Image (cartoon, helix red, strand yellow):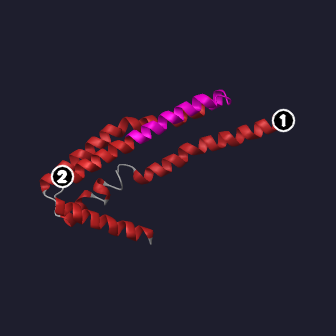
Amino acid sequence: MKKRLVIITGVVALTALLAVPFAFAQHMRGTHGQAFGGPMMFGHLRHAQQMLGLTDQQVTDIKTIFEGLKQQNQQYRQSQRATMQQVAQILLNNPNDVASAQALIDQQTAAERTMKMNALAAASKALNVLTPDQRAKAASLLQQRMGAAQK
C-alpha cells in the first residue's frame, strides 16, 4: 500500500513538473519581445509616435533602449528554458533530490527578477526621452488602457 502511494505521488508530481514548462511557455508567448506590454507600456512604438508626437530622434533613442534590453535579457530567457529541463532531469534521475531541483528554481526566480529590473530600468530610460508634456499624455493614455482592460 505504501509503495503504491509513493508511485502515485511520483507520477502526479512528474506530470505536474512536466506541465510547468508548457504553461510557462504559453505565458511567455503572450509577452514575447515586449517590455511592460510594449515599448513605454502602451503598445507599438509607431502608434506611440503618432499619439505623443515623438520626434524621429526620440523614436531612435527609444528603439535603441529596448533593443539593448532585448540583448541584455537574452541570456536569461535562454537560461530559463534550460532550467526547467534540468529540473525535470534531476527529478527523473532521483525523485528524492528535491533540494537540487529547488536550487535551480531559486536561480530561475533570481533571473526573472533581474529581467524585470532590466525592463524597469529600460522603461525609465525610455520615459526620460519624453518631454514632460509627452509623459503627461502617456500617463493619460496608460490610464485609459488600464480602465478599458478592467471593463
Question: How many residues crowd mark 1 within 10 Å: few (<14), some (14–19), many (20+)?
Answer: few
Amino acid type, label 1: Lys
Say which element carries label 2.
helix
Q: Is residue 148 left or right of residue 48?
A: right
Image quarter where the C terminus lies is bottom left
Magenta-span inclusion, residue 94: yes
Q: Residue at x 38, y 41 (%)?
A: 115
Q: Residue at x 35, y 67 (%)?
A: 145
Q: Secondary structure of the magenta portion, mostly?
A: helix
Image quarter where the N terminus lies is top right
Q: Quadrant of residue 137?
A: bottom left
Compared to residue 126, the image places residue 48 above or below, namely: below
Q: How many numbered discs?
A: 2
Q: Is residue 87 left or right of residue 137?
A: right
Separation (CA) of disc 2 from disc 1: 64 Å
Q: Position of residue 51 (x, y in %)?
A: 22, 66
Q: Residue at x 66, y 27 (%)?
A: 94
Compared to residue 147, the image places residue 129 above or below, namely: above
Q: Position of residue 99 (x, y in %)?
A: 61, 29
Amino acid type, label 2: Val
- Lower position in the chain sequence, tag 2 or tag 1: 1
Q: Residue at x 28, y 63 (%)?
A: 139
Q: Position of residue 20 (x, y in %)?
A: 57, 44
Stretch in magenta: 91-114
Disc 2 target residue: 129
The circle on residue 20 is none
Say which element carries label 1.
helix
The circle on residue 2 is 1
